[in-house]
Amino acid sequence: MPALETELAAERAHLDASRIALRRMRERAEDLFATGDQVAGDPFAAETLGRTLARRIADLADNPDTPLFFGRLDIEKHEYHVGRRHVTDTAGEPMVLDWRAPLSRRFYQASAAEPQDVDVRRRFGFVKGELTSFEDEHLGRGEEQGTSQILLDEIERPRVGPMRDIVATIQPEQDALVRAELDESICVQGAPGTGKTAVGLHRAAYLLYLHRERLRRAGVLIVGPNSAFLQYIASVLPTLGELEVRQSTIDGLLGTPVKGVDADAAAAVKNHEKMALVLRKRLLSKIQRPEEPLTVADGSYRWRISVDALRRVVDDVRREAPPYAIGRERVRARIVSLLMRQSEARRGDSPSEGWQRRMGKSAPVVEVLDHVWPACTPEQLVFEALSDPDPDDELLDEAEREALRWAKPPKSAKSAKWSAADAVLIDEAAGLIDRVPSFGHVVVDEAQDLSPMQARVLARRSEHGSITLLGDLAQGTAPWAARDWGTLLSHLGKPGARVVPLTTGFRVPAAVVALANRLLPALGVDVPAARSLRTDGALTLSTVAEIDKAVVDAAREALGQPGSVGVIAADAAVDGLTEALRGAGIALAGPEDTDGAARVTVLPAGLAKGLEYDHVIVVEPADIVAAEPRGLNRLFVVLTRAVSRLDVLHSRPLPAPLDGLS
Ligand SMILES: Nc1ncnc2c1ncn2[C@@H]1O[C@H](COP(=O)(O)OP(=O)(O)OP(=O)(O)O)[C@@H](O)[C@H]1O
């Protein structure tokens, strides 16, 4: 047989053997699922089983498109398959290792230079769950291949629907972040499409696998910029078998319903870190020194605490600096304890708990407390700070005080229409007044846009845990967006966190990366430029006479290719473009698209962050830039949403950094 045919025959034999193994494993996984159904003995077992089954249903829901394994390691004559989760045979022996297991690390990290005892690493390629190819690297013999074709096929695959997991093709520098220790907080500065979001989600799944009990108790939180983004990433963790993770926006974490909108000047002051001090100062100013002694009647006795003793109590508690509400209870407890000592000395016995409670609630004690340490709710504190900013507070100047004051003052905290920034202030106040439960781990995506006060919301929720901060300073579009990570990390309470850059792009083709990189010098941030792994892709820049018509034509042409199409324009242009596309008979994704078949989405530039489309049509870049103070950063975000093809259509001149390109 000629050499090529021999090789092909051998390859077919390998594939057939792997297909048989795959079928056996899937049958075994389904068996495990079926038997679990019948063994619930008691209510606790039934509940636990219910949870396990729910997870398994989610695990298997993507059958048969999700392969049970995607890799194999040959180590000391043993073959270990690596897949999305453990599968064991009837004797309990592992058939597939979970990708998060310690041994699986070698699948991602072993190299010819450091084979880690791996003789052969095999990657399997699948198309719609069907095993179609494999690649072997004989690391033991010092052989390693360059960029994997299976990885290239995966990143060039058309994107339809929500985000997918990347377990089969996690790259070594991504894996190092995914597997960082639970106690370590990390900040990932990643250029567009370098896999920041993917890394954050896989890190959450990895930490849950390794520290399941600890994290189940404390909880894992993923914070994203808006609900469209959360929907887009929602299915990644379930396909990795993890259902118990809270995914939320910042607004969603706060208890206050948002009914009002701030003027820009008010939002700027309210999001500034000095508001934390303003609120703190205002709250502490409620604490007064006692002026009168306390006298309490107790049957035929009268107990008396001197002004000096009361002052000592208040001063001591103030120095201990507990949260405000706890401070009030501490003062009450210490006053009761002084009363108790007098009672013990006079009566010679220890008063009961009932007596202590009665004393604590007696009118004279409550009167002293209300004077020296009055109760206060978070809403009340913020209401006061916005109704009547303290003129003696040198933290704010008069313009800032004016910006803070309500345009139409509400009668009380109860009737106030709180804005999103007010809700953050109320959360700050709540953190001053009482303790906030902390998550075990918090992943924050698009973190560059957090304001200092929003960062403090997350600092409170990760005080006893760690964080994974994901972002790109170049994509900062909020008025308060971070210019450097150090300052933001301090607001998050993790000043020492390691900042790690990711620069290899998996989404955006090289030609599009080169276009977007032209904007970088004008963005005022110091970040390393991206390098794309993709040499495919197409870029066109066209001057057009009639924008609407050009967009319709471009969308029609885009529909000739597979995958999703995103038409991204300045927010104000979206309605007109929607009408033009609908008028031309192009079905648009959205609420009317009940069967989910439409492939074209019209998207305001303001919502494009974090999303991706196979084909992106960017409409009138100059309008996108002109629409907001950080318009160039917004354009940078918009240009980097394309997976395969980018059309830039403009009738007005292109913004300066792109000048002369079309
Ligand atoms: N190792 C990988 N293997 C396959 N695909 C990958 C890999 N890393 C990233 N990708 C893909 O690249 C695309 C971009 O990833 P992701 O959205 O996580 O990047 P990002 O850095 O968060 O981007 P952005 O800053 O633009 O929001 C996604 O489609 C993701 O699945």
Image (cartoon, grey):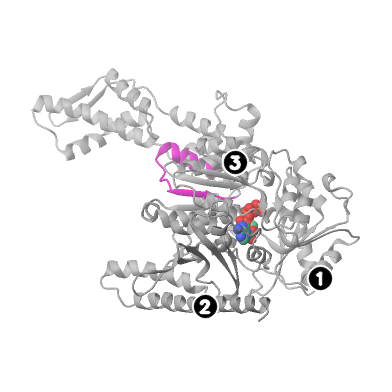
Magenta residues, as a range? 424-445
Q: Quadrant of the N terminus?
A: bottom right
Q: Earlier in the sequence, mark 3 or mark 2?
A: 2
The residue pinned by badge 1 equals 557
Amino acid at circle 3: Ser
- Identify the mark nearer the N-term, 2 or 1: 2
> Does residue 499 appear left or right of residue 339 in this picture?
right
Residue 554 in the image, given as x and y percentages of width and height = 82, 67
Mark 2 to mark 1 CA distance (whole Å): 43 Å
Q: Residue furthest top?
A: 308
Compared with residue 390, is residue 648 higher up or lower down, i.e. above or below?
Answer: below
Rendered view: 419 above or below 289: below
Q: Mark 2 near mark 1, Cβ–Cβ under 8 Å? A: no
**Label 1 vs label 3, nearer the camera:** 1
Q: Please state the horizontal and vertical placement of residue 131, each as a whole percent of the image.
A: 58, 75
| Residue closer to the observer: 490 or 278 | 490
Q: Quadrant of the C terminus?
A: bottom right
Q: Amino acid at mark 2?
A: Ala
Question: Left or right of 96: which side holds 231?
Answer: right
Badge nearest the viewer, 2 or 1: 2
- The answer for how far apart the CA atoms under marks 3 and 2 are is 55 Å
Are circles 3 and 2 on residues that touch, CB within 8 Å?
no
Return the mark for residue 17.
Answer: 2
Residue visible at 68% across and 56% down? 608
Is 440 part of what is drawn in magenta?
yes
Residue in the foreground of this view, choosing between 374 and 486: 486
- Foreground: 615 or 626? 615
